[in-house]
Image (tube, rainbow, N blue to C red):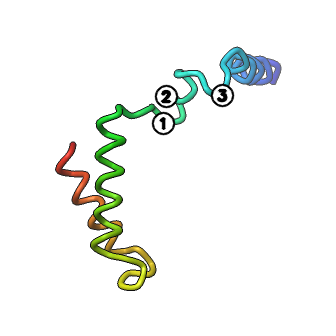
């Protein structure tokens, strides 16, 4: 029982030196910053999807999401 408590304490305390915005923490949580090109591509595809499927045509956004995914495949 003591061993389990010691191991849990070590694991919990080992994350304390890292701030929430450090590169390691963002990598660990899957939030790696994207390059400017990828951000621009995402923005362009999102704008294009909004033009193709406005809220009046696709209020839920299902078609817009599919269009956005297909558009981003061209950039990957």
Identify the residue at horizontal 35%, vertical 31% (top origin): 35
Write down the residue under mark 3. Answer: 20
Q: Residue furthest bottom?
A: 56
Q: Residue furthest left?
A: 74
Between 31 and 52, the residue placed more toward the observer is 52
Write down the residue under mark 1. Answer: 30
Identify the residue at horizontal 28%, vertical 63% (top origin): 48
Q: Pinpoint residue 36: horizontal percent, then vertical percent.
A: 35, 33
Q: Pinpoint residue 69: horizontal percent, then vertical percent.
A: 28, 59
Dots 1 and 2: beta carbons under 8 Å?
Answer: yes
Identify the residue at horizontal 45%, vertical 32% (top origin): 32
- Snapshot quadrant of residue 58: bottom left
Earlier residue among tags 2 and 3:
3
Write down the residue under mark 2. Answer: 27
Q: Pinpoint residue 67: horizontal percent, then vertical percent.
A: 26, 66
As measured in the structure, the alpha-carbon distance from the residue carrying label 1 to the one carrying label 2 is: 5 Å
């Amino acid at each position: 029982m003591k061993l389990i408590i010691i191991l849990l304490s070590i694991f919990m305390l080992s994350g304390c030196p890292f701030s929430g915005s450090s590169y390691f923490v963002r990598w660990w949580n899957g939030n790696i910053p994207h390059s400017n090109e990828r951000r621009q591509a995402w923005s362009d595809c999102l704008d294009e999807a909004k033009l193709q499927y406005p809220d009046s045509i696709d209020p839920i956004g299902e078609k817009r999401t599919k269009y956005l995914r297909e558009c981003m495949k061209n950039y990957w």
